[in-house]
């Protein structure tokens, strides 16, 4: 009996816990879901601690993953539940995604005194996301980084610029950070690109080109600038624009499209769980963001071989596009520059093979192995 208990204890110690809030159909939720598949494929026993559980990615969680629904109204209110979990299960490692969840994990580990290895995963360029905000708002986000992040065993970021930014904000030695590319490209990418994309404008053609944007309808993605760029381009050539996604700015964007006189040439069909089929049939993918960490949708479009244009926002696009040598980068919020780049991408599309090669590190097996190394497996 004692031997069985010891064996069970060893198995429990080897478990990997993942703490995150699934708040919708965003890129972080997609990335974590991909990683869960990668961990299970590597034979790791995984517990998923959900601070919140919303969005279509919940349906993609592997059956082998044990899900713990914490159902907290705020991340901090989940602290007692996370502490109870750590005391009871004592997982070997805890991977945490998103800033507020990271604070809870670090406090829970400190208060329980367990020896679980805590690794934070940060995808947002924090100072870029807070540009233009009040000093109070910035300090409210910076102080937890300075006080709590040094307690982490390791911090994974999705881009060098994100690591540099957090190291500066938190006064944390840069060597404490590890850059791992997001596991954005699924193993069945080819099958997904060949799946149907049910829209009358697709597939695009030379005479009827289609530009595509993908993401939540929020200020961060700045689809308003994309609409203005598309309107400027439409004055000199035909084209259509599809925006995949949804969010709080939908009404504003629909109104702006009508005001710009392009309403008939803009479609907003909502969220789609297979954007690759749409990317593969579009003429040009456009990232118009004001800030990012590492834009998953840009990587996905390149993996599909689709010509891309991106804003040179902090951070991610410059690293992915080799500072404009692979595909055009334009200033944030500059609709005229974005329109010109969109036209150039139509006239002189890059070699699809070069686009795919540039994002080879974003495939699931390579990213999974790097994460497991940092986590201690």
Image (cartoon, helix red, strand yellow):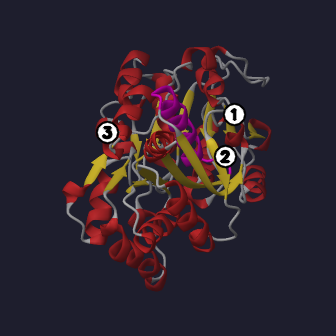
Residue 35 relative to residue 328: left or right? right
| Residue at the spot of label 1 | 273
**Residue stretch in magenta:** 23-43
Residue 373's tag is 3
Please report the residue visible at 29 percent of the width from the left and 36 percent of the height from the top: 322
Sequence-wise, the earlier of marks 1 and 2 is 2
Q: Which secondary structure dominates the residues rendered in magenta?
A: helix
- Contact between labelled residues 2 and 1, with CB atoms less than 8 Å apart: yes
Q: Position of residue 12 (x, y in %)?
A: 49, 45
Residue 10's tag is none
Please report the residue visible at 49 percent of the width from the left and 80 percent of the height from the top: 137
Can residue 310 be seen here? The reply is yes
Q: Position of residue 69 (x, y in %)?
A: 69, 55
| Residue at the spot of label 2 | 25
| Foreground pick, 21 / 164 | 21
* Inter-mark Cα distance, 3 to 1: 30 Å
């Amino acid at each position: 009996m004692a031997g069985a208990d010891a064996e069970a204890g060893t198995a429990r110690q080897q478990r990997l816990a993942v703490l995150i809030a699934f708040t919708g159909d965003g890129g972080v939720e997609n990335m974590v879901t991909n990683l869960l598949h990668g961990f299970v494929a590597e034979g790791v026993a995984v517990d998923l601690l959900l601070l919140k559980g919303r969005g279509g990615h919940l349906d993609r969680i592997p059956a082998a993953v044990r899900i713990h629904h914490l159902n907290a109204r705020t991340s901090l209110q989940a602290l007692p539940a996370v502490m109870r979990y750590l005391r009871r299960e004592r997982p070997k490692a805890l991977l945490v995604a998103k800033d507020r969840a990271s604070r809870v994990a670090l406090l829970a580990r400190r208060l329980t005194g367990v020896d679980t290895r805590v690794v934070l995963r940060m995808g947002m360029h924090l100072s870029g996301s807070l540009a233009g905000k009040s000093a109070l708002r910035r300090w409210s986000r910076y102080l937890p980084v300075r006080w709590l992040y040094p307690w982490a065993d390791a911090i994974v970021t999705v881009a060098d610029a994100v690591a540099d930014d957090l190291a500066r904000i938190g006064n944390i030695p840069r060597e404490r950070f590890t850059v791992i590319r997001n596991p954005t490209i699924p193993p069945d990418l080819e099958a997904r690109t060949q799946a149907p994309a049910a829209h009358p404008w697709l597939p695009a053609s030379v005479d009827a080109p289609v530009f595509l944007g993908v993401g939540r309808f929020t200020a961060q993605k700045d689809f308003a600038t994309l609409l203005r760029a598309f309107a400027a381009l439409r004055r000199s050539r035909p084209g259509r624009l599809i925006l995949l996604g949804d969010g709080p700015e939908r009404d504003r964007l629909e109104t702006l499209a009508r005001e710009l006189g392009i309403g008939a040439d803009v479609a907003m069909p909502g969220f789609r769980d297979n954007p690759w089929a749409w990317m593969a049939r579009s003429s040009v993918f456009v990232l118009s963001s004001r800030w990012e960490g590492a834009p998953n949708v840009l990587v996905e479009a390149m993996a599909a071989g689709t010509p891309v244009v991106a804003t040179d926002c902090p951070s991610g696009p410059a690293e992915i596009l080799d500072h404009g040598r692979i595909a055009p980068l334009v200033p944030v919020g500059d609709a005229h520059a974005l329109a010109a780049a969109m036209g150039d991408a139509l006239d002189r599309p890059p070699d699809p093979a070069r686009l795919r090669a540039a994002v080879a590190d974003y495939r699931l097996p390579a990213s999974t192995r790097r994460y497991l190394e940092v986590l201690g497996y």
